[in-house]
Image: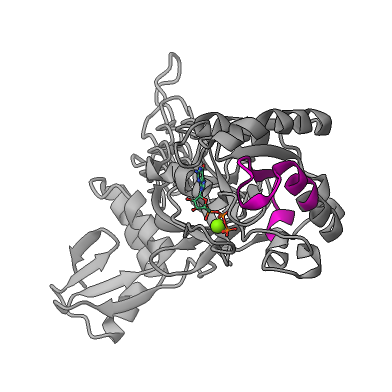
Amino acid sequence: MQFIDRTKISVKAGDGGHGKSAFRREKFVPKGGPSGGDGGRGADIVLEVDRNMNTLLDFRYRRKFKGENGENGDIKNQYGRNASPCIVKVPAGTMVFDDDTGELIADLTEVGQQATVAKGGRGGRGNAKFANSANRAPTFAEFGEPGESRNLVLELKLLADVGLVGYPSVGKSSLVANVSAARPEIADYPFTTITPVLGVVQTDYEKSFVMADIPGLIEGAADGVGLGHDFLRHVERTKLILHLVDASGMEGRDPVEDYHKINAELRKYSEKVARRRQILVANKMDLPQAQENYPRLVKLAEQEGIRIFPISAVTRQGLKELVACVGEALEQYVDEPEEEGEAKVYDAGAEDPERISISRNDAGDFVVAGKALEKLVAMTNFNNDEAVRRFQYIWRLKGIDEKLRERGIREGMTVHIGEMEFEYRE
Ligand SMILES: Nc1nc2c(ncn2[C@@H]2O[C@H](COP(=O)(O)OP(=O)(O)OP(=O)(O)O)[C@@H](O)[C@H]2O)c(=O)[nH]1
Ligand SMILES: [Mg+2]
């Protein structure tokens, strides 16, 4: 059984702040040097595993995340402030894919683990940074680098927080159907449920948990009788067990006896399952026999030192209280120490930033692509002659003219780089 929750989000990291072009004007310093400061870094978008999240439901309300921009540089060599990263909380077990390429970007397994999914732009350099022996007073500064944008797919294999155990026909599926969007089959014959069904239960706007409805257990289940055995391992990984009994004792069974028998099976199956905290749920309280049996069940709960909730999955009586209590119990839950899974981090975008590729689009225009070059274009202020000259210098250094000529470019043809387009001149 696997239940996969899937959602799409889009992220945009913050742009770098612009560099400043300025000159010192101080008393007694007649002709000050360049003193424009650099812009600050834009905010990265960072996914972080949060202990209190266990589903992707929150992303229904918020699908777009944008990082803050870096501050612009200022006069007197003042640097712009870097923006703090934008932290997006995700549950443990979230796999992150690039929606456009399908590539796995991160596999987040441990609480606190982080993955940077979009890099904030570098701050543009102020004119002070461009001073050299050949040009002591450069008038241009760089724009900030744009932050990365990405469309992501988040995927979560759901593990149940809460397992429902009990005899067949006690109303496990009816409960799941009434507290979640899951629609398990419900019928008045035993073993209606033959494979587990997971339901996401929302406790309030922020929190939710996953409830597993498993096939009913019977005596001998731990030894493989009935259907329950294969599914007890799902219970093994839950944090809390809701032990359902049919308080009405229909079909000649006694709910108190049932409770002990099921626990004996759990103990036989594994100590770990037997140690799981339980809440006793007395179902079918709408029936008169259930009212009669209830005081004995309360006594049982007292003896066992566990909580009891009277409910009716049919009339929905007591369901709200039960869900609230389960939500609280899960918040207090402390993990048993377990062998740690290995946290895997994938390095996205291992492509060489310096690589340049040239292609033709449908209109016959030349398209020059390459991370470093596109960045340079975005950060250059083309209204400043000096900045343009610097751009041309780097352009020549990279030998792009030659590459374009090899591909047959002629005077007056259009060249695209990132967002920019220009006319080619020898
Ligand atoms: N009167 C009454 N009937 C209920 C209540 N809850 C469930 N039932 C009935 O009990 C029968 C069994 O319910 P299910 O929810 O299928 O029980 P289950 O525990 O999932 O059963 P298995 O899947 O066979 O293990 C159905 O006929 C339900 O309508 C309740 O609160 N009151
Ligand atoms: Mg069922």
In the picture, the quarter occupied by the N terminus is bottom right
Horizontally, is 219 left or right of 180 in the view?
Answer: right
User: Which residue is drawn at the image coordinates 63% and 40% (left, top)?
Assistant: 247
Q: Is residue 291 above or below residue 389?
A: above
Please tell me whether residue 210 is drawn above or below residue 317 in the rendered image.
below
Q: Nearer the viewer, residue 349 or 105?
A: 105
x 77%, y 60%: residue: 219
Considering only vertical position in the picture, is 386 above or below 420? above
The residue closer to the viewer here, 102 or 325, is 325
If the image is split into quadrants, where does the C terminus sit? bottom left
- Residue 194, percent across and down? 57, 67
Looking at this view, is 132 or 198 the one in front?
198
Q: Is residue 44 visible?
A: no
For the point 40% across and 51% down, which residue is it? 9
**In the image, residue 74 lies in the stretch drawn in magenta:** no
Kindly tell me whether residue 230 is visible in this rendering: yes
Answer whether residue 237 is magenta in the image.
yes
What's the image's color scheme?
one colour
- Quarter residue 417 falls in: bottom left
Magenta span of residues: 234-261
Left or right of 374 on screen, residue 246: right
Q: Residue at x 45, y 24 (%)?
A: 76
What is the x, y in percent for residue 182? 45, 53
Q: Residue 337: x, y in percent?
A: 83, 47
Residue 48 placement, left or right of 86: right
User: How many numbered badges does the structure rendering display?
Assistant: 0
Where in the figure is residue 27, as x and y percent of width and height?
43, 13
